[in-house]
Amino acid sequence: MYDLMKTIHVVAAVVWIGGVILSQVNGALAAKSGEQARMLGFIRFQAWLGKAYFAPASIVLLIAGVVMVIDSGWEFSDLWIVIGIALYALSVIIGALLLTPKSEQLTAGIEQKGMGDAGVQSLAGQLALLSRVDLLILVLVVINMVVKPGV
């Protein structure tokens, strides 16, 4: 059971972080294009990905991780597991409470004021920074899982 769950856990992590990296590239290209329709399409696609791709991958990752801990003899109080869960929770919070609403605000701002508006550009910059922070958190989770501090 442990090997199966570890495989599922790692594949879900690759799916999640790979998707976030690709989203960073696509977001930068959409922003650089200066094309309003392209940027709106990117933001709308990201909203769909959040629900249909990132959320399921993160849930599968969490479930497989919990089953691994229960099946393995590891403890939920082990430092590397505590760090992993905390960083996972932080990423989920950033996505649900910050990235999603700011994306909706950005979409409305672009539709109402256009991409050249200073407020829209500021919001786009905030969203880009938040998404990069989220990517950094996911990279830290991977490093944590590999290094396993405290073991």
Image (spheres, rainbow, N blue to C red):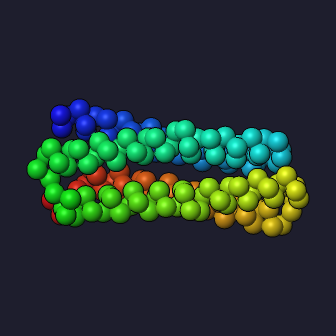
Classify residue 104 as left or right of residue 75: right
- Residue 112: % across, % down: 88, 56
- Residue 18: % across, % down: 48, 40
Q: Is residue 66 placed above or below 102 in the rendered structure?
A: above
Classify residue 19 as left or right of residue 59: right
Question: Does residue 123 appear in this view?
Answer: yes
- Residue 26: % across, % down: 65, 42
Residue pictured at 81% horizontal, 58% vertical = 109
Residue pictured at 28% horizontal, 34% vertical = 7
Question: Does residue 149 appear in this view?
Answer: no
Q: Nearer the viewer, residue 48 or 124?
A: 48
Total label count? 0
Residue pictured at 74% horizontal, 57% vertical = 106
Q: Nearer the viewer, residue 25 or 71?
A: 71
- Residue 70: % across, % down: 17, 48
Classify residue 130 as left or right of residue 120: left
Q: Quadrant of the N terminus?
A: top left
Q: State which quadrant residue 11 falls in.
A: top left
Residue pictured at 18% horizontal, 62% vertical = 78
Q: Quadrant of the C terminus?
A: bottom left
Q: State which quadrant residue 120 falls in.
A: bottom right
